[in-house]
Image (spheres, rainbow, N blue to C red):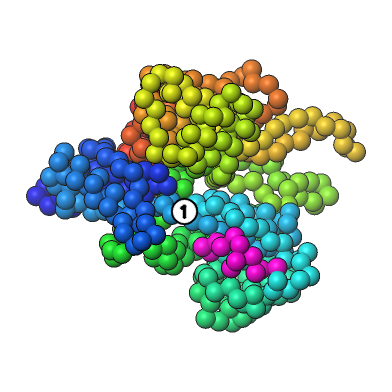
Amino acid sequence: MADGRADLAVCVDFGSTFTKASLVDLTEGRIVASASHPTTLPAPDGTGDVLDGYDACLAELVAAEPRASAAEVLACSSAGGGLRIAVVGNEELVTAEAGRRVALSSGGKVVDVIAAASRADGSAAYRSLSHTTRPDVVLLTGGTDGGNTEVLLRAARDLVSSGWRGPLVVAGNVDARDEVSAILGEVPHVLADNVVPRIGVLAPDSARAAIREIFLSHVIGGKRLSARADFTAMVRGATPDIVLTGVELLARGLDDAHPGVGDVVVVDVGGATTDVHSVVEVDPEDGAVDAHGLAREVVATTPVTRTVEGDLGMRWSAATTVAEAGLTELADAAAHRQADPSYVPGSDDECEVDEAIARAAVGLALRRHAGRSRVVVSPEGRVVERTGKDLREVDLLVGSGGVLRNGRPGVAGRVLSGSVGTDLEGGWQLPRRARVVVDTDYVLAAAGLLAGPHPEAAYRLALRVIDTPGG
């Protein structure tokens, strides 16, 4: 085609460490060219722009394919700290926990969780939002539909009284929604469906869409990462949210004619965090109602789950990663990497250290996500108690992150092998027979970006991840 915009798209991820760009052939659903550049954040003196790194990437793409200069541009971003979310809910173990899970699945880093029902200090409970934790958005939840509205309304009033003027997503008892909106007044907010419409049910989709709307309309521009208007125009969502969309497409496909690959877990080892995304069909017995009409879980397990481990990573979090794993012999090397986040290993010895840090981050992150299965004695007798997301029957484990994409031959086997198999000790619900691949071409973020405007191209692109062996 003569018009490059018709059959090509540039997909960009403004990451915390690197900006990555891919030129995608929309007809074939494949990566034509790729480029990366250290993310260029604005300096305190006002110089610099996040699009400086993008310009360098685009120049590489144009050198490989001149039509890239006219291609449609779609982007996601976790630069400048990503999406920071605070959660306010009624009870710590119910709506506050539900809100935390929804915030994570929306691509956010949860920086505060406040259980309003247990706080008697009124607006003082929320002053930390403006002065300490400083979230980009507050997710306000509380109450089941048709239930008590008092705590939700009081939380809204106390938030306003505390001086909070940032954006909110309201996803609590729908009976109180209009009254909450009136209380918030000029404070920017989006109304969503209740994340816990009834006990034992978690409904994240409406709130997840509302958080994305807030991210695009308030957060991206508010971070002042760029003085150029085209930055806000190209961004479609927070990077983890977009990646999770790509994972869903890979797992579930588009329709019967375009099937997915089955249950999938993706572990993405970054410089600052290690994210785990899973799409796993939930056992209908999990969270089911027993003979007495009581739900086994007050916050149900959902098929689509994301966890983010802010203390596990290759650079900014390297020191805490090796400390958590007990790798004291790597403390000095980790501190060096943390002091220089742009560090790139040069020798085999340096690569081995990076792989050891990655192996620790992957193992810890997957275990936190999956939890354990163990037999305990209860009043009903011996029962199986489970925590986390059961990944044992997952069909596909995808590794992602620079350490895996750019590593030496066989890196995935060395980094991921300790988290897959039938002989793992400790009762961890980790994949037993999953096929292991690496998202070498970083297609899942691009597939997530393309899923809305170009679904068939996104589908073809997502499936390409299974063509890459895990080595």
Q: Quadrant of residue 439?
A: top left
Q: Is residue 307 left or right of residue 463?
A: right
Q: Is residue 175 left or right of residue 18?
A: right
Q: Secondary structure of the magenta portion, mostly?
A: helix
Image coordinates of residue 91 in percent, x first then y, are: 74, 60
Q: Above or below — where is 299 with respect to 280?
A: below
Residue that protrudes farthest toward the right in the picture: 379
Q: Above or below — where is 2 with respect to 348?
A: below
Q: Does the magenta portion include 62?
A: no
Q: Above or below — where is 148 with respect to 2?
A: below
Q: Is residue 134 left or right of residue 386?
A: left
| Residue that mark 1 sits on | 82
Residue that protrudes farthest toward the left in the picture: 2
Image coordinates of residue 411 in percent, x first then y, are: 43, 22
Specify whether residue 253 is in view.
no
Q: Which segment did they paint magenta?
A: 125-137
Image coordinates of residue 253 in percent, x first then y, are: 41, 41
Which residue is rendered at x = 29% and y = 54% of the image? 51
Which residue is rendered at x = 62% and y = 29% of the image? 325
Give the mark count: 1
Which residue is rendered at x = 42% and y = 29% of the image? 404
Which residue is rendered at x = 65% and y = 78% of the image? 161
Task: Give whichever of 168, 291 is nearer the camera.
Answer: 168
- Looking at the picture, which amino acid does disc 1 mark? Gly
Q: Label 1: few (<14), some or many (≥20) within 10 Å?
A: many
Q: Above or below — where is 153 with respect to 57?
A: below
Image coordinates of residue 290 in percent, x first then y, are: 78, 46
Specify whether residue 287 is in view.
yes
Task: Give whichever of 269, 184 is nearer the camera.
Answer: 269
Image quadrant occupied by the C terminus: top left
Mark 1 secondary-structure assignment: loop
